[in-house]
Image (cartoon, grey):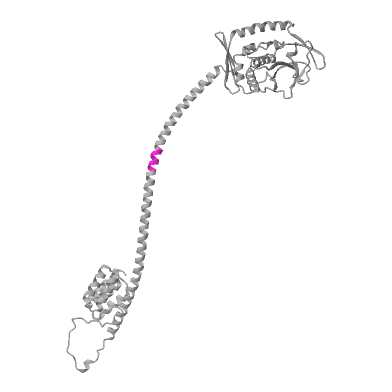
Amino acid sequence: MSLSEQRMEHGIALWKKDQRAEARKIFDSIVKSDMRNEAAWVWYIYSLETNTEKIEALKIFLSLFPGHMIGIKALENLRKEGGQIAVMPAGNKQTPERSSKTSHTKPRPAQSSKPAKWPISYAIAWLLTIVSLGLIAGGAVISVSQYNVLQSEIQALKSSSRIAEQNYSRLNNDFQSLKSTNTYLIYEYNNLDGKHKSLHTEYSQLAEKFDALAGDYDNLNDIALKPPYIVVHDRKVDATFYDTDGQLISWVMPFSDFEYDFENGAKTRSLVIDGNWQAREISRMDDSLLWVRDFSVFITPDAFQSVIPELYGKSSTPHEFIYRVWHMIGQLTHYASEELETPRYPLETMLAGGGDCEDLSILLASMIKAAPVDWVVDLVYVDLDNIQDPKEPNHIVVYINTGEESFIVEATSDQKMLPYDEGVTGWLAGKLQSTENPRPVYLH
């Protein structure tokens, strides 16, 4: 129960105890503090002492509640009857008070003891007043109920407002946090943007340097000395080749070794031209005879003792060692065919940068024989057109037998070291010195 309702009940209780002055003060204070309280107005109007005061109070009441039909009717009745009708709250059965100004008259004779009759207009006005005030009181009860409902709604709205305030506070905190984060990110972005511009400038400078160096590289690459190469200086010869792993194999030889090969090579070739040098008789498969020259005397390994033993020691298997030597020979890509066979010593072939089949085979055999092993290394005369059933020897390959496995190596190829997968049938140069005419043998 609200404070106004409690005060109303207290005022009504005082009225019923005939403490009307105190009750009127309470009703008066309620309508002043709560001008829209209809029930308080009804009791306040009823508590007024004169009808003139009641008329003035009803005017104020109707200004607050315009169009209030019951209040309008009560005001009209008070004015018609000269302001002599009292206004009583609905349900109150007390006799309306008469004005204190009513004159006292002496009692009339016996007939005056009969009850006086009021004019019908007074009765009707009184009835309308009672009904009107009853409706006002009923409306006051309804208004109190609506007031309670509104109070509940107000409390609910206040609760919602508190929740909204809490949500606002939380969202505001989140906003401030996001605002701080945004400020930091803007700072970081500006910082990174500055670094990006700096790095872009450095990149542009490096790109210019790279382009300049690339141009220098291309120019140097055009004039650079690239392996394989042989450089002669201070009566020394520096030989450099690529190894199978891309590293360089280099060694130094005295120029006197080359001079020796040049002198002997020139003498030998002059004898070959004369037609009387190292001619050997061999037999075909059908025992018919042929003549060939023995080139095995050109195999001279001594010139490679400064490089081959070390290369052999760094190889894990015989096959790897043979392949690394063959790879070096394959870099001498210049193949020189000859109308007349004029074999060269191995250093002559290196300095010339290439040769024909017997020259390259002699060079390969000489380097393999420089290894610190006791292998069979020989030249093989073959018929390339009939590799397993030779008719005429027209090509030379290298035969290597380690005691555990054998290899037939093609010295003129830089693509495949062992192209003869099914073996070869040919004449071994090592048998040309035999008294019997050597026949071709099958070599695995």
| Magenta-colored span | 182-189
Q: Quadrant of the N terminus?
A: bottom left
The percent coordinates of residue 215 (x first, y second) are 51, 22
Q: Which quadrant of the view contains residue 75?
A: bottom left
Tell me if residue 244 is in the magenta stretch. Answer: no
Q: Is residue 136 above or below residue 330?
A: below
Q: Count all numbered tags in the image, as a single digit.
A: 0
Q: Which quadrant of the view contains residue 368?
A: top right
Q: Which quadrant of the view contains residue 397?
A: top right
Q: Is residue 23 above or below residue 355?
A: below
Q: Quadrant of the C terminus?
A: top right
The percent coordinates of residue 256 (x first, y second) are 60, 7
Query: Viewer-proximal residue, 154 or 315?
Result: 315
Tell me if residue 184 is in the magenta stretch. Answer: yes
Q: Residue at x 42, y 33 (%)?
A: 197
Q: Is residue 407 left or right of residue 14?
A: right
The percent coordinates of residue 340 (x first, y second) are 72, 10
Query: Viewer-proximal residue, 119 or 367?
Result: 367
Query: Viewer-proximal residue, 32 or 319?
Result: 319
Q: Is residue 313 above or below residue 9?
A: above
Main SS type for the magenta part? helix
The percent coordinates of residue 137 (x first, y second) are 31, 75
Q: Residue at x 40, y 38 (%)?
A: 188
